[in-house]
Image (tube, rainbow, N blue to C red):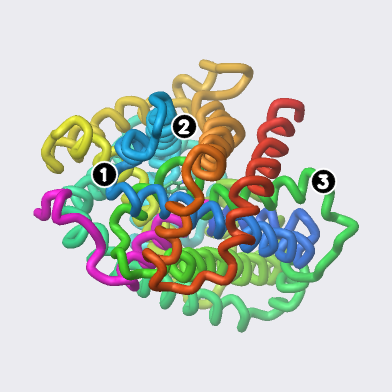
Amino acid sequence: MDNNKSRGFTSNIGAILAAAGGAVGLGNIWRYPYMLGQNGGGAFLIVNLFFVLAIGIPLMMTEFVIGRRTQSNVVGAYKKLERKKGWATIGYFSILAVVLIYAFYSVVAGWTLNYIVLSCTNSLSGLTPNEIADAFASFTAGSFWPLLYQFCFLMLTALVISFGVQKGIEKISKILMPVLFVLLLLMVVRSLTLPGAKEGLQFLFKPDFSKLTGAGVLGALGQSFFSLSLGMGAMVTYGSYIRKEDSLFKTSLWISVCDLMVAILAGVVIFPAVFSFGMDPAGGPQLVYVVLPNVFNNMPMGGLFAAVFFLLLGIAALTSTISLQEIIVAFSVEELHWTRRKSSIISMISIFVIGIFCTLSFGPIRHWTLFNRTIFDFFDLVTASYLVPIGALATTIFLGWFYPKVEVKDEITNGGALKCRFFELYYFILRIVAPIALIIIIVSGIVG
Ligand code: TRP
C-alpha cells in the first residue's frame, strides 16, 4: 500500500488511462447514444464535439491546475490556494455531489453485475421480450439481490482503492481500459456485420439539424460535463497525481478523445443491432437492460456477445466508481488523517447506507418522493442540474477571477518549459465563456 504522500501516477499514460476510466462510464454507454439518436444524430455530435473542445477541455485543464498546483484533495486544494477564507466550501460542495452521485450510480453499477451473471449463466436466452421486461422489473423492484450486487460493486471498488494510487488505481486502469477498448471493438464488428446495420447507423449519424432543439443543445452541453466528470473535484483529485513534467493540455485532450470515442462506438454497437432486429430505440436503463437482451437473443452467438457487452459495461462503471470513491478517500486521508484502509472502508459503508435508499426507491420505498421524484431520480436531478454546474461555476470564478494569472500560466506551461500558444484563448474561456455557459445551464435547470 502506498501512502498518499509518495503520491501520484508513475507515467503520463497511467494518468490518461486512469482519468479516462473515470470519465468513461455508464453515461457513455447508455446515455450518449440515446441522446445522439433523439437529437438529430450527427447534428448533436457536432454540437457536443464543439462543447467538449471549447469548454470541456479548458475546464478539465482548470481542475488539473488546481489539483497539481496544490498536490491536494479537493478540499485541501482550495484551502491552499485561497487568499481569503471561504473558497474551500467549493471542495465540501464537491464531496457532497460525489456522495450523492456515487449513491445512485452504484445502484446501476450493481445491476450490471447481475446482468454479467445472468448472461454468463445463459439465463436470459430463450425468454420472450415480455419475460425479459418482467425479469428486469422484478429484479430492480426487489430488495435482497439488488442490494447485494450494489454492495459487491462497492466492495470491489473499495478493494482497488485500498491498494493506493499506483498499485491500485493506476495498475487496474492500465489493464481494464485496453480490455474495454478491445471488447468494444469486438462488439462493433459484431454489430456492423448484422443485416440492416445501415439503418441504425443512419439513425445515429445522419445530421438532422431540424431535430436539434434548444433543449438538445443544452443537453449536449450538460452531457459533455457529466461525461468528462467535470465539476465535482474528480479531476482536481486526479490532477494532484499527474507528474509535474506532463502537459496538462495534452493529457486533457487525450482523455476527452477516449471519452468521446467510447461514446460514439457505443452508439455504433447499440443502434445497428437494435434496428437490425426491429426493436424500439428507447432510452435510459430500459435500452441496455431490456431492449439489448432481446437483441442478443436473436443474434447468432448472442449469449457470448451478451456476456461481452455486460462485462464491458461493468468495467466502464468500475473505473468510474473508483474515481468517485478516490475523491472521498483522498479527502479523508489528507484532511482527516485517516489511513487509506480506514478511509476506504468507512466511505464504502457510508455510501452503501445512503445507496440503500436509492436501490429501494425502485421497490419497497418507491412511494417516498422528494419534489415528486423517487429518491434515485431526486439525487440524479439535484447533482446533474444543480450541484455539478454550480460547483463548476464556482471553480471557474475562483481560478479565473480570484487567483493570479501568472500562477495559472506557470502551472499550464510547467513553469515555462512548455510553450502554450493557446494560453490567452484558454484564459478567456476560463474567465468569460465557461461561466456564461454554466450560468445558462443552471438557470435553464431552474426554469425548465
Ligand atoms: N463520467 C461518468 C460517466 O460518464 C459519470 C461521472 C460523473 C463521474 N461525474 C463523475 C465518474 C465523477 C467519476 C467521477 O458515466
Which residue is denoted by mark 2 in the rendering? 141
Which residue is denoted by mark 1 in the rendering? 152
Amino acid at dot 3: Gly
| Residue 86 sits in quarter | top left
Q: Which residues are magenta?
A: 1-27
Badge 1 or badge 3: first in the primary sequence: 1
Task: Name the spot of residue 242 as percent of width and height, x first.
Answer: 32, 61
| Mark 3 crowdedness (10 Å alpha carbons): few <14, some 14-19, many ≥20 | few
Badge 1 or badge 2: first in the primary sequence: 2
User: Horizontally, is 206 left or right of 84 in the view?
Assistant: right
Question: Which residue is nearer to you in this view: 220 or 156?
Answer: 220
Whole-number angstrom distance, CA of label 2 to CA of label 3: 35 Å
| Residue 64 sits in quarter | bottom left
Local secondary structure at mark 1 = helix
Whole-number angstrom distance, CA of label 1 to CA of label 3: 41 Å
Quadrant where the C terminus sits is top right
Amino acid at dot 1: Cys
Question: Which residue is nearer to you in this view: 345 or 236?
Answer: 236
Question: Is 20 within the magenta?
Answer: yes
Amino acid at dot 2: Ala
Residue 142 visible in the current orientation = no
Badge 2 or badge 3: first in the primary sequence: 2
Whole-number angstrom distance, CA of label 1 to CA of label 2: 18 Å
| Mark 2 crowdedness (10 Å alpha carbons): few <14, some 14-19, many ≥20 | some
Local secondary structure at mark 3 = helix
Q: Tell me which residue sits at (45%, 41%) in the image.
A: 232
Please give the label number shown on residue 354.
none
Q: Is mark 2 within 8 Å of ligand 1?
A: no
